[in-house]
Image (tube, rainbow, N blue to C red):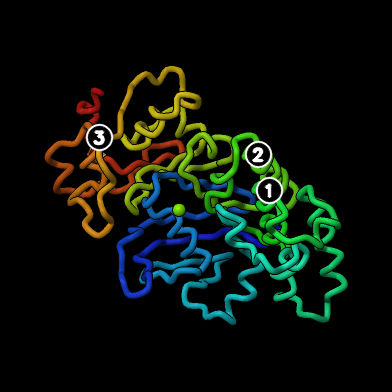
Amino acid sequence: PGLLDRLSFEGGRPRLKDLVVHAVNGVSFSIAKGEVLALVGESGCGKSTVAKTIARIYDPSSGRIRIEGEDITDYDHAKLLPVRAKMQMIFQDPFASLNPRQKVRDIVAEPLLQQVGDGARAEVADKTEALLARVGLNAEHGGRYPHQFSGGQRQRIGIARALSVNPGLIIADEPVSALDVSIQAQILNLMMDLRDEFGLAYLFISHDLSVVHHIADRIGVMYLGFMVETAPRDQLFARPRHPYTRALLSAAPSIRPSRMTEEIELTGEVPSALSLPTGCCFRTRCPFAWDRCAVERPVLQDIGDGQSAACHLIDEPERDNQ
Ligand code: SF4
Ligand code: MG
Protein backbone atom coordinates (compact mmCIF):
# COMPACT_ATOMS: atom_id res chain seq x y z
CA PRO A 1 0.00 0.00 0.00
CA GLY A 2 0.94 3.64 -0.17
CA LEU A 3 1.72 3.79 -3.87
CA LEU A 4 -0.16 6.95 -4.45
CA ASP A 5 1.41 10.28 -3.68
CA ARG A 6 -0.81 12.51 -5.60
CA LEU A 7 -3.34 12.17 -8.33
CA SER A 8 -4.47 15.01 -10.44
CA PHE A 9 -7.19 15.20 -12.98
CA GLU A 10 -8.33 17.91 -15.23
CA GLY A 11 -11.55 17.03 -16.90
CA GLY A 12 -12.33 17.75 -20.47
CA ARG A 13 -15.17 16.52 -22.56
CA PRO A 14 -15.41 12.74 -22.20
CA ARG A 15 -16.26 11.06 -25.46
CA LEU A 16 -19.15 8.65 -25.00
CA LYS A 17 -19.40 6.54 -28.12
CA ASP A 18 -19.98 9.00 -30.97
CA LEU A 19 -21.80 11.58 -28.99
CA VAL A 20 -19.54 14.21 -27.53
CA VAL A 21 -21.25 15.51 -24.45
CA HIS A 22 -19.89 18.37 -22.42
CA ALA A 23 -20.38 16.16 -19.42
CA VAL A 24 -17.56 17.64 -17.41
CA ASN A 25 -16.02 21.06 -17.90
CA GLY A 26 -12.72 22.17 -16.48
CA VAL A 27 -13.09 20.09 -13.35
CA SER A 28 -9.66 19.91 -11.76
CA PHE A 29 -8.55 18.44 -8.48
CA SER A 30 -5.94 16.32 -6.79
CA ILE A 31 -6.12 13.71 -4.07
CA ALA A 32 -3.34 13.24 -1.54
CA LYS A 33 -2.29 9.89 -0.13
CA GLY A 34 -4.72 8.77 2.55
CA GLU A 35 -7.23 11.49 1.71
CA VAL A 36 -10.96 11.07 1.15
CA LEU A 37 -12.29 13.44 -1.50
CA ALA A 38 -16.03 13.27 -2.01
CA LEU A 39 -17.79 14.53 -5.12
CA VAL A 40 -21.46 15.27 -4.51
CA GLY A 41 -24.32 16.42 -6.67
CA GLU A 42 -27.59 15.29 -8.17
CA SER A 43 -27.64 12.56 -10.76
CA GLY A 44 -26.45 13.79 -14.12
CA CYS A 45 -24.01 16.31 -12.64
CA GLY A 46 -21.03 14.48 -14.11
CA LYS A 47 -19.56 12.94 -10.95
CA SER A 48 -19.71 9.37 -12.27
CA THR A 49 -18.23 10.58 -15.54
CA VAL A 50 -15.30 12.04 -13.62
CA ALA A 51 -14.84 8.75 -11.76
CA LYS A 52 -14.97 6.64 -14.90
CA THR A 53 -12.70 9.01 -16.77
CA ILE A 54 -10.05 8.85 -14.05
CA ALA A 55 -10.37 5.06 -14.02
CA ARG A 56 -9.88 5.25 -17.82
CA ILE A 57 -13.18 3.50 -18.49
CA TYR A 58 -14.10 6.63 -20.46
CA ASP A 59 -11.58 8.55 -22.55
CA PRO A 60 -11.30 12.28 -21.95
CA SER A 61 -11.27 14.42 -25.09
CA SER A 62 -9.15 16.99 -23.33
CA GLY A 63 -7.46 17.38 -19.98
CA ARG A 64 -4.88 15.16 -18.30
CA ILE A 65 -4.99 12.39 -15.69
CA ARG A 66 -1.87 11.85 -13.63
CA ILE A 67 -1.17 9.35 -10.91
CA GLU A 68 2.00 9.78 -8.88
CA GLY A 69 3.11 12.26 -11.51
CA GLU A 70 2.68 9.69 -14.30
CA ASP A 71 0.42 10.90 -17.10
CA ILE A 72 -1.88 7.99 -17.95
CA THR A 73 -4.29 9.93 -20.18
CA ASP A 74 -3.22 8.27 -23.42
CA TYR A 75 -2.33 4.81 -22.10
CA ASP A 76 -3.64 1.81 -24.00
CA HIS A 77 -4.95 -1.36 -22.37
CA ALA A 78 -1.51 -2.94 -21.93
CA LYS A 79 0.04 0.16 -20.37
CA LEU A 80 -2.95 0.56 -18.05
CA LEU A 81 -2.47 -2.88 -16.50
CA PRO A 82 0.22 -1.81 -13.98
CA VAL A 83 -1.78 1.38 -13.30
CA ARG A 84 -4.72 -0.81 -12.21
CA ALA A 85 -2.56 -1.86 -9.26
CA LYS A 86 -2.54 1.76 -8.13
CA MET A 87 -6.22 2.51 -8.47
CA GLN A 88 -9.27 0.31 -8.31
CA MET A 89 -12.94 1.03 -8.59
CA ILE A 90 -15.94 -0.13 -6.59
CA PHE A 91 -19.47 0.34 -7.86
CA GLN A 92 -22.95 1.14 -6.63
CA ASP A 93 -24.38 -2.23 -7.54
CA PRO A 94 -21.81 -4.87 -6.74
CA PHE A 95 -24.13 -7.52 -8.13
CA ALA A 96 -23.98 -6.00 -11.60
CA SER A 97 -20.21 -5.69 -11.40
CA LEU A 98 -19.51 -9.22 -10.09
CA ASN A 99 -19.50 -12.09 -12.58
CA PRO A 100 -22.46 -14.32 -11.54
CA ARG A 101 -20.73 -17.49 -12.80
CA GLN A 102 -17.53 -16.93 -10.88
CA LYS A 103 -16.95 -18.14 -7.34
CA VAL A 104 -16.27 -15.37 -4.87
CA ARG A 105 -12.66 -16.40 -4.32
CA ASP A 106 -12.01 -16.18 -8.07
CA ILE A 107 -13.72 -12.80 -8.26
CA VAL A 108 -11.52 -11.46 -5.47
CA ALA A 109 -8.34 -13.01 -6.91
CA GLU A 110 -8.83 -11.85 -10.48
CA PRO A 111 -7.22 -8.38 -10.42
CA LEU A 112 -4.20 -9.73 -8.54
CA LEU A 113 -3.79 -12.71 -10.88
CA GLN A 114 -3.78 -10.27 -13.78
CA GLN A 115 -0.87 -8.49 -12.12
CA VAL A 116 1.26 -11.42 -10.96
CA GLY A 117 0.33 -14.18 -13.43
CA ASP A 118 -0.78 -17.77 -12.92
CA GLY A 119 2.59 -18.85 -11.50
CA ALA A 120 1.71 -17.20 -8.20
CA ARG A 121 -1.64 -18.98 -7.69
CA ALA A 122 -0.77 -20.34 -4.24
CA GLU A 123 0.20 -16.93 -2.87
CA VAL A 124 -2.85 -15.39 -4.47
CA ALA A 125 -5.09 -18.01 -2.82
CA ASP A 126 -3.60 -17.21 0.60
CA LYS A 127 -4.02 -13.51 0.07
CA THR A 128 -7.61 -13.97 -1.13
CA GLU A 129 -8.51 -15.86 2.02
CA ALA A 130 -6.93 -13.17 4.19
CA LEU A 131 -8.80 -10.44 2.30
CA LEU A 132 -12.14 -12.20 2.68
CA ALA A 133 -11.51 -12.44 6.41
CA ARG A 134 -10.50 -8.79 6.55
CA VAL A 135 -13.78 -7.60 5.03
CA GLY A 136 -15.85 -9.84 7.31
CA LEU A 137 -16.34 -12.96 5.17
CA ASN A 138 -14.78 -16.39 5.57
CA ALA A 139 -13.07 -19.09 3.53
CA GLU A 140 -16.31 -21.01 3.10
CA HIS A 141 -17.89 -17.91 1.53
CA GLY A 142 -15.12 -18.02 -1.07
CA GLY A 143 -16.66 -21.13 -2.62
CA ARG A 144 -20.05 -19.54 -3.17
CA TYR A 145 -21.51 -17.40 -5.95
CA PRO A 146 -22.51 -13.70 -5.78
CA HIS A 147 -26.27 -14.37 -5.78
CA GLN A 148 -25.91 -16.23 -2.47
CA PHE A 149 -25.02 -12.99 -0.68
CA SER A 150 -26.88 -9.92 0.54
CA GLY A 151 -26.21 -6.47 -0.94
CA GLY A 152 -23.92 -5.51 1.94
CA GLN A 153 -21.94 -8.75 1.65
CA ARG A 154 -21.60 -8.25 -2.08
CA GLN A 155 -20.16 -4.82 -1.47
CA ARG A 156 -17.66 -6.45 0.94
CA ILE A 157 -16.69 -8.80 -1.90
CA GLY A 158 -16.23 -5.82 -4.24
CA ILE A 159 -14.03 -4.12 -1.65
CA ALA A 160 -11.90 -7.26 -1.12
CA ARG A 161 -11.46 -7.53 -4.89
CA ALA A 162 -10.36 -3.90 -5.12
CA LEU A 163 -7.92 -4.34 -2.23
CA SER A 164 -6.26 -7.42 -3.74
CA VAL A 165 -3.70 -5.37 -5.68
CA ASN A 166 -2.81 -2.99 -2.81
CA PRO A 167 -4.10 0.12 -4.55
CA GLY A 168 -3.27 3.61 -3.27
CA LEU A 169 -6.59 4.97 -4.53
CA ILE A 170 -10.06 3.49 -4.55
CA ILE A 171 -12.66 5.19 -6.70
CA ALA A 172 -16.02 4.41 -5.13
CA ASP A 173 -19.08 5.36 -7.20
CA GLU A 174 -22.14 5.50 -4.92
CA PRO A 175 -20.86 2.46 -2.98
CA VAL A 176 -23.63 2.48 -0.37
CA SER A 177 -26.57 4.02 -2.26
CA ALA A 178 -28.23 0.68 -2.92
CA LEU A 179 -27.98 -0.48 0.72
CA ASP A 180 -30.25 -0.09 3.75
CA VAL A 181 -29.17 2.68 6.09
CA SER A 182 -27.95 0.31 8.84
CA ILE A 183 -25.86 -1.61 6.30
CA GLN A 184 -24.57 1.65 4.84
CA ALA A 185 -22.98 2.51 8.18
CA GLN A 186 -21.26 -0.89 8.38
CA ILE A 187 -19.76 -0.53 4.91
CA LEU A 188 -18.67 3.08 5.51
CA ASN A 189 -17.03 2.04 8.79
CA LEU A 190 -15.23 -0.80 7.03
CA MET A 191 -14.02 1.59 4.32
CA MET A 192 -12.70 4.03 6.93
CA ASP A 193 -10.93 1.26 8.88
CA LEU A 194 -9.29 0.10 5.66
CA ARG A 195 -8.26 3.64 4.87
CA ASP A 196 -6.38 3.87 8.17
CA GLU A 197 -4.93 0.37 7.91
CA PHE A 198 -3.68 0.60 4.31
CA GLY A 199 -3.21 4.35 3.88
CA LEU A 200 -5.85 4.35 1.15
CA ALA A 201 -7.14 7.43 -0.59
CA TYR A 202 -10.74 7.44 -1.76
CA LEU A 203 -12.50 9.35 -4.46
CA PHE A 204 -15.99 8.92 -3.08
CA ILE A 205 -18.90 9.70 -5.37
CA SER A 206 -22.31 10.28 -3.81
CA HIS A 207 -25.57 12.16 -4.29
CA ASP A 208 -26.04 12.10 -0.50
CA LEU A 209 -24.46 14.81 1.66
CA SER A 210 -25.28 12.93 4.85
CA VAL A 211 -23.17 9.99 3.63
CA VAL A 212 -20.14 12.10 2.70
CA HIS A 213 -20.51 14.02 5.96
CA HIS A 214 -19.27 10.88 7.74
CA ILE A 215 -16.26 10.08 5.63
CA ALA A 216 -14.94 12.97 3.54
CA ASP A 217 -11.89 15.07 4.34
CA ARG A 218 -12.69 17.36 1.47
CA ILE A 219 -15.82 17.79 -0.60
CA GLY A 220 -16.39 18.98 -4.14
CA VAL A 221 -19.94 19.95 -5.09
CA MET A 222 -20.74 19.42 -8.77
CA TYR A 223 -23.58 20.76 -10.87
CA LEU A 224 -24.11 20.13 -14.58
CA GLY A 225 -20.52 19.10 -15.11
CA PHE A 226 -19.01 22.03 -13.21
CA MET A 227 -17.35 22.06 -9.83
CA VAL A 228 -19.28 24.85 -8.10
CA GLU A 229 -17.75 24.66 -4.63
CA THR A 230 -14.94 22.82 -2.92
CA ALA A 231 -13.94 22.95 0.73
CA PRO A 232 -12.65 20.91 3.65
CA ARG A 233 -15.58 18.94 5.06
CA ASP A 234 -16.18 20.94 8.26
CA GLN A 235 -15.82 24.22 6.43
CA LEU A 236 -18.38 23.22 3.81
CA PHE A 237 -20.98 22.27 6.39
CA ALA A 238 -20.30 25.27 8.65
CA ARG A 239 -20.05 27.92 5.92
CA PRO A 240 -21.48 26.79 2.58
CA ARG A 241 -21.17 29.62 0.07
CA HIS A 242 -22.59 28.51 -3.25
CA PRO A 243 -26.41 28.72 -3.49
CA TYR A 244 -26.50 25.15 -4.80
CA THR A 245 -24.56 23.81 -1.81
CA ARG A 246 -26.83 25.82 0.47
CA ALA A 247 -29.89 24.34 -1.23
CA LEU A 248 -28.54 20.81 -0.76
CA LEU A 249 -27.91 21.54 2.92
CA SER A 250 -31.37 23.11 3.33
CA ALA A 251 -32.77 19.78 2.22
CA ALA A 252 -30.68 17.82 4.74
CA PRO A 253 -31.85 18.96 8.19
CA SER A 254 -30.00 16.21 10.06
CA ILE A 255 -26.58 17.50 9.05
CA ARG A 256 -26.97 21.19 8.40
CA PRO A 257 -25.48 23.54 11.00
CA SER A 258 -28.02 24.67 13.60
CA ARG A 259 -27.32 28.35 12.97
CA MET A 260 -28.18 27.88 9.31
CA THR A 261 -31.81 28.90 9.14
CA GLU A 262 -32.17 29.79 5.47
CA GLU A 263 -34.30 27.61 3.27
CA ILE A 264 -33.28 27.48 -0.34
CA GLU A 265 -35.64 25.24 -2.15
CA LEU A 266 -34.50 23.62 -5.37
CA THR A 267 -37.17 24.01 -7.99
CA GLY A 268 -37.19 23.08 -11.64
CA GLU A 269 -35.25 20.47 -13.53
CA VAL A 270 -31.54 20.16 -14.10
CA PRO A 271 -31.04 21.47 -17.66
CA SER A 272 -29.70 19.09 -20.30
CA ALA A 273 -25.93 18.87 -20.56
CA LEU A 274 -26.45 19.26 -24.30
CA SER A 275 -27.84 22.77 -23.91
CA LEU A 276 -26.04 24.41 -21.02
CA PRO A 277 -27.43 27.74 -19.81
CA THR A 278 -25.34 30.76 -20.78
CA GLY A 279 -23.38 32.32 -17.95
CA CYS A 280 -23.79 30.46 -14.67
CA CYS A 281 -24.81 26.81 -15.06
CA PHE A 282 -27.03 27.09 -11.96
CA ARG A 283 -28.89 30.26 -12.87
CA THR A 284 -32.12 28.58 -14.07
CA ARG A 285 -32.65 27.30 -10.52
CA CYS A 286 -30.92 29.96 -8.44
CA PRO A 287 -33.08 32.29 -6.30
CA PHE A 288 -30.33 34.95 -6.37
CA ALA A 289 -29.72 35.08 -10.11
CA TRP A 290 -29.49 38.52 -11.72
CA ASP A 291 -28.53 39.75 -15.17
CA ARG A 292 -24.79 39.30 -14.70
CA CYS A 293 -25.40 35.58 -14.09
CA ALA A 294 -26.84 35.15 -17.59
CA VAL A 295 -23.85 36.60 -19.40
CA GLU A 296 -20.79 35.76 -17.35
CA ARG A 297 -19.76 32.28 -16.27
CA PRO A 298 -18.43 32.43 -12.68
CA VAL A 299 -15.10 30.71 -12.09
CA LEU A 300 -13.96 28.97 -8.92
CA GLN A 301 -12.52 31.65 -6.63
CA ASP A 302 -10.44 31.03 -3.57
CA ILE A 303 -12.35 32.39 -0.58
CA GLY A 304 -9.85 31.32 2.08
CA ASP A 305 -9.29 28.35 4.40
CA GLY A 306 -9.13 25.96 1.47
CA GLN A 307 -12.60 26.85 0.23
CA SER A 308 -13.47 27.90 -3.32
CA ALA A 309 -16.79 28.71 -4.92
CA ALA A 310 -17.95 29.70 -8.40
CA CYS A 311 -20.59 32.38 -7.86
CA HIS A 312 -20.87 36.10 -8.58
CA LEU A 313 -22.26 36.66 -5.06
CA ILE A 314 -18.67 36.48 -3.84
CA ASP A 315 -17.97 39.78 -5.66
CA GLU A 316 -21.38 41.27 -4.84
CA PRO A 317 -22.25 39.95 -1.37
CA GLU A 318 -24.90 42.64 -0.83
CA ARG A 319 -27.16 40.63 -3.16
CA ASP A 320 -26.96 37.67 -0.81
CA ASN A 321 -30.02 38.60 1.24
CA GLN A 322 -31.85 35.31 1.24
FE1 SF4 B 1 -26.78 32.06 -8.55
FE2 SF4 B 1 -25.60 33.93 -10.01
FE3 SF4 B 1 -24.23 32.66 -8.10
FE4 SF4 B 1 -24.92 31.42 -10.34
S1 SF4 B 1 -23.52 33.15 -10.18
S2 SF4 B 1 -25.08 30.62 -8.29
S3 SF4 B 1 -26.93 32.30 -10.76
S4 SF4 B 1 -25.99 34.02 -7.84
MG1 MG C 1 -23.89 8.13 -11.18
Nearer to us in this view, 311 or 81: 81
Circles 2 and 3: CB atoms closer than 8 Å: no
Q: Position of residue 211 (x, y in %)?
A: 54, 38
Residue designated by label 1: 150
- For label 1, the crowd category at 10 Å Cα-Cα, with few meaning under 14, some 14 to 19 and many 20 or more, is few
Disc 2 to disc 3, C-alpha distance: 40 Å
- For label 2, the crowd category at 10 Å Cα-Cα, with few meaning under 14, some 14 to 19 and many 20 or more, is some
Visible residue check, residue 170: no
Q: Is the CB atom of the residue marked by disc 3 within 8 angstroms of ligand 1's nearest atom?
A: yes
- Secondary structure type for disc 3: helix
Residue designated by label 2: 183
Residue type pointed to by label 3:
Leu
Horizontal side, residue 72 vs residue 83: left or right: left
Disc sitting over residue 313 in the figure:
3
Circles 1 and 2: CB atoms closer than 8 Å: yes
Horizontal side, residue 48 vs residue 108: left or right: left
